[in-house]
Amino acid sequence: MKEYFDIIKAPIITEKSNNIASDDRKYVFKVDARANKTQIKQAIENIFKVKVESVNTINVKPKKKRVGRYAGMTNKYKKAIVTLAVNNKIDL
């Protein structure tokens, strides 16, 4: 991985991720599928200037989609649930 912004694609802001983030210490990000937990931790710490306590990852598999007669698949990606240390916060 070259840049930290290549690892962290976007925050995931859904109802489920808001329920996870309700304690103000956990955040959900869409990350590059090739990134490992150490790279994700370093990227979050350098981009947002916070201390990361732990990183949990989930591989999201592609789903079949159909538009008319054309069938295809969505892109696969990795989802990272980042737990911050006490008294750290990210403004999204």
Image (cartoon, rainbow, N blue to C red):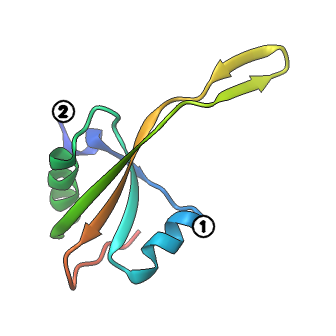
Q: Which numbered disc covers residue 15?
A: 1
Q: Secondary structure at mark 1?
A: helix
Is disc 1 surrounded by few (<14), some (14 to 19) or many (20+) residues within 10 Å?
A: few
Is disc 2 surrounded by few (<14), some (14 to 19) or many (20+) residues within 10 Å?
A: few
- 91 lies above or below 13: below
Q: In which quarter of the view is residue 55 placed? A: bottom left
- 23 lies above or below 13: below
On the rendered image, what quadrant is the C terminus found in?
A: bottom left
Q: Nearer the viewer, residue 62 or 45?
A: 62
- Mark toward the start of the polypeptide (1 vs 2): 2
The residue that appears at 14% across and 53% down in the rendered structure is 42
| Left or right: residue 16 compared with residue 2 | right
The residue that appears at 30% across and 62% down in the rendered structure is 82
- 11 lies above or below 74: below
Q: In which quarter of the view is residue 50 placed? A: bottom left
Residue identifier under label 2: 1
Residue 24 shows in the view: yes
| Left or right: residue 51 compared with residue 69 | left
Location of residue 39 in the rendering, given as x and y in whole percent from the top left corner: 17, 45
Q: In which quarter of the view is residue 31 placed? A: top left
